[in-house]
């Protein structure tokens, strides 16, 4: 068996060294196989993730193919509302509509935890979800609608029920919900076929956010500084002032990196959420790629094709350079 052969080669004079055996084992693990040729837990997990990605891609293709012109308008409205949701509550917080003095830098959760910024955020966020939820309801499959409902519930859990500053258990539930909500956005990136540059910006911002969060946590513990949710801005400011100057600068940089990366993370998704839809309508593959060079789009209008209900169907049929195209490249938007 492979195990006996490995054992025999190890016992033989001049056989592989301990370092060689370690490298071999690491190679087996990363390939998803044990030395016995059996699949590892990591390998099974990777296979499940690939299967899930294929399922999401299939759902994405079906969702985008069913979008109507009205759905696209709703998505644009949702994008505008989500952008406002990122900007307006933050401005209101620093205009001291909820507390004074304010904290800078601060996370999104901290700035919307109470007062006018909180209710403004909730109103804009709900309005954005009302628009996007209608699209999921009209064009999504049952699985897609279940995912959207679960993501919406996660947002309610995180920002409405367990908002930051409610105590140790409440903050733990908030952090758990925030992490789940970010994972949900990773699914949405594939579901909306968001273009690669926006995906890269989202993931890079997430990486910076996690690294800065961990760095700030270590600095707070080392110098006895309360986390932002456990002390008022005035108390935390006094604690930071008592720390060494180098620690103050390091903590400010970590907090600023958290604030910047968190806002960039959501902005990258919101700005790119229509990129896959627009690429598909323009003849691309739905993943941010441009239409095939040399092809041109011919608009076809016909009435009475949408189930006999008299709606107008506007389609784009890709034609070859000679001007004749087959029906296989047709992509319709119903109005």
Image (cartoon, rainbow, N blue to C red):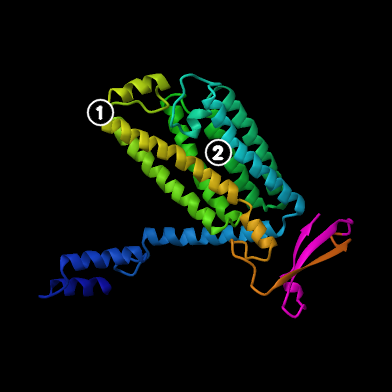
Residue that lies at the very extreme toward the bottom in this rendered image: 322
Question: Which part of the image, by quadrant, shows the C terminus?
Answer: bottom right
Q: Which mark is residue 86?
A: none
Give the image location of residue 259, x and y in percent.
Answer: 45, 37
- Which residue is identified by label 1? 244
Give the image location of residue 195, x and y in percent.
Answer: 57, 58
Q: Quadrant of residue 127?
A: top right
> N-terminal of the two: label 2 or label 1?
2
Q: Which mark is residue 154?
A: 2
Up the image or down, 115 lies above or below 273; here it is above
Q: Residues within 10 Å of mark 1 (few under 14, many from 20)?
A: few
Question: Which part of the image, by quadrant, shows the N terminus?
Answer: bottom left
Is residue 27 a member of the stretch shown in magenta?
A: no
Give the image location of residue 245, x and y in percent.
Answer: 27, 29
Give the image location of residue 260, x and y in percent.
Answer: 46, 40
SS for callout 1: loop
Q: Given this view, does label 2 or label 1 mark the residue nearer the observer?
A: 1
Q: Is residue 135 left or right of residue 227?
A: right
- Residue at the image point whose x is 27% and y is 73% from the top: 2
Q: Is residue 144 visible?
A: yes
- Residue at the image point whose x is 43% and y is 60% from the top: 46
Up the image or down, 269 lies above or below 238; here it is below
Residue that lies at the very extreme toward the left in this rendered image: 13
- Residues under numbered marks 2 and 1 in contact, where contact means CB atoms less than 8 Å apart: no
How many tags in the picture? 2
Q: Nearer the viewer, residue 64 or 50?
A: 64
Measured Cα–Cα span from mark 2 to mark 1 = 39 Å
Q: Nearer the viewer, residue 146 or 212?
A: 212
The range drawn in magenta is 308-335
- Residue at the image point whose x is 86% and y is 64% from the top: 302
Q: Quadrant of residue 58?
A: bottom right
Q: Is residue 160 visible?
A: no
């Amino acid at each position: 068996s492979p195990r006996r052969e490995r054992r025999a080669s190890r016992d033989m004079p001049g056989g592989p060294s301990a370092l060689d055996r370690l490298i071999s084992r690491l190679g087996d693990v990363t390939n998803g196989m044990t030395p016995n040729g059996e699949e590892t837990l990591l390998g099974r997990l990777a296979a499940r993730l690939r299967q899930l990605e294929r399922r999401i891609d299939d759902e994405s293709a079906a969702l985008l193919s069913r979008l109507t012109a009205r759905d696209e308008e709703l998505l644009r409205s949702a994008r505008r509302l989500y952008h406002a949701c990122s900007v307006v509550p933050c401005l209101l917080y620093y205009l001291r509509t909820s507390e004074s003095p304010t904290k800078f830098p601060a996370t999104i959760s901290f700035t919307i935890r109470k007062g006018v910024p909180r209710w403004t955020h909730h109103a804009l966020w709900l309005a954005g979800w009302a628009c996007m939820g209608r699209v999921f309801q009209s064009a999504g499959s049952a699985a897609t609608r279940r995912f959207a409902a679960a993501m919406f519930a996660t947002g309610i859990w995180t920002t409405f029920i367990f908002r930051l500053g409610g105590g140790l258990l409440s903050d733990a539930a908030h952090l758990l919900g925030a992490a789940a909500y970010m994972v949900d956005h990773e699914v949405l990136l594939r579901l909306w076929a968001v273009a690669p540059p926006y995906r890269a910006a989202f993931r890079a911002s997430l990486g910076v956010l996690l690294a800065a969060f961990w760095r700030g946590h270590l600095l707070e513990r080392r110098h006895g500084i309360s986390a932002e949710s456990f002390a008022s801005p005035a108390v935390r400011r006094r604690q930071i002032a008592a720390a060494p100057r180098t620690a103050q600068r390091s903590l400010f940089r970590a907090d600023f990196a958290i604030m910047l990366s968190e806002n960039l993370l959501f902005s990258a998704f919101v700005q790119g959420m229509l990129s896959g839809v627009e690429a598909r309508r323009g003849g691309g593959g739905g993943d941010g790629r441009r239409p095939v060079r040399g092809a041109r789009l011919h608009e076809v209008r016909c009435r009475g094709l949408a189930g006999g209900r008299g709606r107008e169907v506007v389609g784009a049929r890709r034609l070859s350079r000679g001007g004749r195209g087959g029906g296989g490249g047709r992509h319709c938007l119903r109005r």
